[in-house]
């Protein structure tokens, strides 16, 4: 429950921020009840330091004759200071509008989605029987064996590595910190998912005991909550990011491999050409596209480089938005074409075709049409009988001999707390850019004091990623000010 005695005042203010019109207002859409659910956890600090003193000051203004309407709220939203207020009125109104927008537009059950034209229902018929591929897991007893190769991380890279190694006859132990999640377990909460984790996330790790350290000009900061935007979410589950990605399957263009020599090196950067070319990598692009299953039209992207085989499935049908984009691009002399996607556009390898539900990114696919390592390469590796998948295992460090050759890993079982050493002839680190670098640095020894593979000091540096802007929901949804 919200820790404020005058619930009617909170309800009235919510309905000014999101008033009823052709769509229900905030309270009719259940925003107050939702605030009750999250008050003690996610909003506890808001209520202590901002909402309660702000509501007290608002109540005093109303008692003095002010009218709670859009004009008053707009005035408060433009004031940093106000007589009788101990907190900023603008911060109070803006923050409450922000969280009210979360509860109104982020919840499927609020009834607000039709008002913004969002329909998550499938646009194509859903098969009567949907087959969801679930990789076969082994228990901790599998850690007692000896393997040719240990693969750390069961995401895109680790899944492919397990597939290729077992195909060559190697005995493989595939470890992951997370567990396999069903589509229902991943959920469809737009407020608590991998891409927008304002109130938690759906891909692990657990909220408690897994802090991050973020460095900026002011120093280092410990970030304890995975839903803090500075935490930088990494999917930690069997399948990794392929469980919740959008499924885009772009190849690098030939020039992407020679950016430094073609465009020069910006001052202060570490930009360098790749040590291989597009032509050398092209056969591997083709194999991945065929094995995972990509839909698209390779003939329409003229700068992409030659292809040794077409995509195995036709592209998704054009949407209304794509038609508008195409017309605008043509007017500018530009070309467009369908995005290559790791999504079935036809029944393939026992998995259904896409039903066009529009909920790819951040969620699990309801019909398993989107390809990931969990439903393609990992099951193929397991089917050889040479691979064991053991989830729920935190790899603490890589073990090496005096020459620096990897001999195994130290593993902590996250369920039992049992710590053990697992031996192998080689170790593949496929835990993602951040976690792989962390593991190399955490595996320092007397012979390798700066971490494994880090004699030049470059491990953990030069990371280049995609930046995503946070949605400005407070501007988009507050209809009164």
Image (cartoon, rainbow, N blue to C red):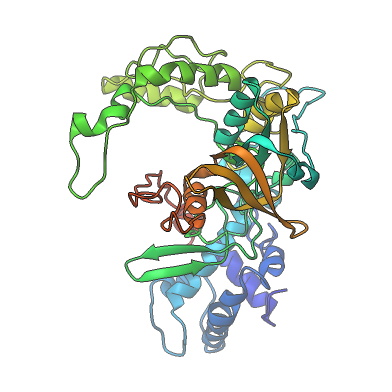
Closer to us: 49 or 217: 217
Q: Which quarter of the rendered picture does the C terminus lie within?
A: bottom left
- Asked whether, in this view, residue 255 is left or right of residue 293, the answer is left
Give the tally of numbered discs. 0
Closer to us: 84 or 239: 239
Q: Which residue is drawn at 44% across and 63% down?
A: 214
Q: Position of residue 313 (x, y in %)?
A: 57, 14
Closer to us: 382 or 27: 382
Instruction: Say which quarter of the image contains residue 74.
Output: bottom left
Q: Position of residue 223 (x, y in %)?
A: 51, 66
Residue 304 visible? no
Residue lying at the far top in this picture: please name it. 309
Instruction: Say which quarter of the image contains residue 430.
Output: top right
Above or below, comparing residue 432 to residue 228 in the picture: above
Above or below, comparing residue 456 to residue 134 in the picture: below
Q: Residue at x 35, y 21 (%)?
A: 278
Residue 339 visible? yes
- Asked whether, in this view, residue 237 is left or right of residue 65, the answer is right
Above or below, comparing residue 90 to residue 294 in the picture: below
Q: Position of residue 256 (x, y in %)?
A: 31, 29
Q: Which quarter of the rendered picture does the N terminus lie within?
A: bottom right
Q: Which residue is drawn at 67% across and 46% down?
A: 422
Above or below, comparing residue 257 to residue 202 in the picture: above
Q: Position of residue 65 (x, y in %)?
A: 52, 86
- Asked whether, in this view, residue 314 is left or right of residue 74, the answer is right
């Amino acid at each position: 429950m919200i820790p404020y005695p005058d619930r009617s005042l909170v309800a009235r203010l919510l309905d000014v921020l999101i008033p009823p019109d052709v769509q229900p207002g905030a309270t009719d859409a259940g925003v107050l009840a939702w605030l009750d659910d999250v008050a003690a956890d996610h909003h506890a600090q808001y209520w202590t330091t901002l909402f309660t003193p702000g509501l007290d000051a608002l109540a005093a203004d109303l008692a003095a004759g002010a009218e709670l309407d859009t004009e008053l709220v707009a005035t408060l939203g433009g004031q940093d200071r106000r007589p009788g207020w101990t907190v900023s009125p603008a911060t109070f109104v803006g923050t409450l509008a922000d969280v009210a927008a979360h509860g109104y537009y982020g919840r499927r059950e609020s009834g607000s989605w039709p008002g913004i034209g969002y329909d998550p229902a499938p646009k194509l018929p859903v098969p009567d029987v949907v087959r969801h591929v679930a990789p076969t897991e082994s228990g901790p007893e599998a850690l007692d064996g000896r393997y040719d190769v240990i693969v750390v991380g069961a995401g895109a890279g680790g899944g492919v590595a397990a597939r290729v190694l077992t195909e060559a006859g190697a005995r493989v132990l595939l470890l992951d910190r997370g567990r396999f999640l069903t589509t229902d377990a991943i959920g469809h909460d737009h407020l608590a998912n991998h891409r927008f984790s304002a109130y938690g996330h759906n891909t692990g790790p657990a909220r408690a005991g897994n802090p991050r350290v973020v460095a900026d000009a002011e120093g280092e900061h410990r970030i304890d909550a995975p839903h803090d935007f500075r935490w930088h979410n990494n999917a930690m589950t069997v399948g990794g990011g392929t469980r919740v990605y959008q499924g885009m399957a772009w190849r690098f263009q030939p020039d992407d491999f020679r950016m430094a020599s073609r465009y020069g090196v910006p001052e202060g950067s570490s930009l360098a050409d790749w040590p291989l070319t597009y032509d050398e990598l092209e056969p591997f692009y083709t194999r991945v596209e065929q094995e995972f299953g990509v839909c698209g039209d390779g003939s329409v992207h003229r700068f992409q480089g030659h292809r040794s085989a077409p995509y195995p499935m036709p592209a998704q049908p054009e949407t209304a938005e794509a038609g508008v984009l195409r017309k605008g691009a043509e007017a500018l002399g530009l070309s467009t074409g369908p995005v290559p996607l790791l999504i079935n556009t036809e029944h393939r390898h026992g998995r259904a075709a896409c039903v066009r539900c529009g909920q790819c990114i951040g969620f699990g696919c309801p019909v398993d049409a989107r390809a990931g390592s969990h439903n393609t390469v990992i099951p193929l590796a397991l089917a050889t009988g040479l691979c064991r998948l053991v989830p729920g295992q935190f790899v603490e460090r890589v073990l090496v001999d005096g020459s620096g050759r990897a001999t195994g890993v130290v593993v902590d079982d996250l369920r039992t707390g049992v710590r053990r050493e697992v031996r192998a002839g080689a170790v593949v680190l496929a835990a993602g850019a951040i976690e792989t670098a962390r593991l190399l640095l955490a595996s320092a020894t007397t012979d390798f004091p700066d971490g494994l593979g880090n004699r030049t000091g470059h491990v953990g540096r030069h990371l280049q990623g995609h930046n995503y802007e946070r949605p400005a929901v407070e501007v988009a949804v507050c209809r009164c000010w």
